[in-house]
Image: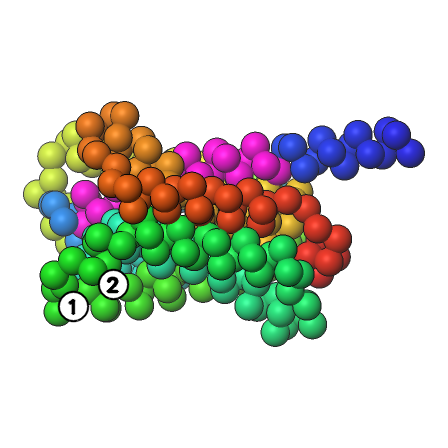
Amino acid sequence: MKSGMKTALSDVHKGALAGVVVVLCWSGFNIVSRFGSTGAFTPFDLAALRYGVSGLIALPLFVWMVPPREWPRYMVLALFGGLGYGLLVYSGFKFAPSAHAGVFVNGGIPFWTVIMLAVGAGFRIPRRVLIALLLSTAGLVLIGYESLLAPRDGNEWIGDALFLAAAWTWAVFGLLMRRWQIKPQRAILGIASFSAITYLPVYFMWLPKTIHQAAWSDLLLQGGYQGIIAALLAAGMYSYANQKIGASQASMMLALVPAVSAIGAFFLLGESISLTVGVGIVVVSAGAAIGALPHKEATRQS
């Protein structure tokens, strides 16, 4: 009995640690992607770098490790956790700033996850999960308050809608990973492989591109971050956390991303943190902490 409890606790700790890695990776993702989308790259260029680099690494390993009869599920995961998510997010950065992505993507993923669990699996939302979701949402709105209420570009709402759609695709990916119990390393190899096979021919033949105008330093930054850190490391750690601590808990941890980004910008870039943002960081951290704790009802259904 004691041995089993130790193993369970060990799984929880491992899942939480994987979630922390995801938070750190995604905290840089919004900034790097926004920088690329407003610079020498189109959203299609960023997607090509993401899937080109990750696919080059993943495809030989995937073909070697996974028999063809199991490929259909990996194609579905690639549709949601690969192509769908990446194209929607990169397109959103063309219209709206990274602060909006922090609110709508990182707030949208736990929101959609809880909603789909409730609707699709007869999941009664525990009071603690509901409180955590409300706190996280309130904290995210406070963090993005100044940006959300700033003088708006007429097309920013398009970016916000794309970010919410991206959050939905990632939530679907997380729930499918949990339901199918696919090993995280195989899932990420499959997503990268099928995303590359599907997307790159379309990109090279038909989609607008300005990648040839980019400096080598920008290519290395975007290719390394998008193709290795975001597509392989962060996605793999999220899949692992999802299976160890549950879909709702893993998704709730993503609400910490804007808070960590703001703190990182304060120490690394000298950007100030206003009182509103500071309060938002405290509130969203409390919500994420409450939501990430294991609870019997959520664990059973997720």
Q: Which residues are magenta?
A: 15-37
Residue behind mark 2: 159
Element type at mark 2: helix
Residue behind mark 1: 155
| Residue 276 falls within the magenta-colored stretch | no
Q: Residue shown at 38%/61% (left/top)?
A: 166
Determine whether label 1 and label 2 are within 8 Å by CB: yes
In the rendered image, residue 162, in percent from the top left (x then y), is placed at 31, 65
Quadrant in the rendering for residue 208: bottom left
One can see residue 139 in this view: yes
Q: Residue shown at 19%/44% (left/top)?
A: 36
Q: Residue shown at 46%/39% (left/top)?
A: 22
Q: Residue furthest left?
A: 213
Q: Residues within 10 Å of mark 1 (few under 14, many from 20)?
A: few
Q: Quadrant of the N terminus?
A: top right
**Majority secondary structure of the magenta segment?**
helix
Q: Is residue 260 left or right of residue 20?
A: left
In the rendered image, residue 40, in percent from the top left (x then y), is placed at 11, 45
Compute the Cα span from label 1 to label 2: 7 Å
Residue nearer the viewer, 86 or 100: 100
Colour mode of the rendering:
rainbow
- Numbered marks: total: 2
Residue nearer the viewer, 221 or 242: 242
Residue nearer the viewer, 53 or 247: 247
| Residue 31 falls within the magenta-colored stretch | yes
> Residue flagged by tag 1: what amino acid is it?
Asn
Q: Is residue 297 left or right of residue 40?
A: right
Up-down: is 58 above or below 248?
above
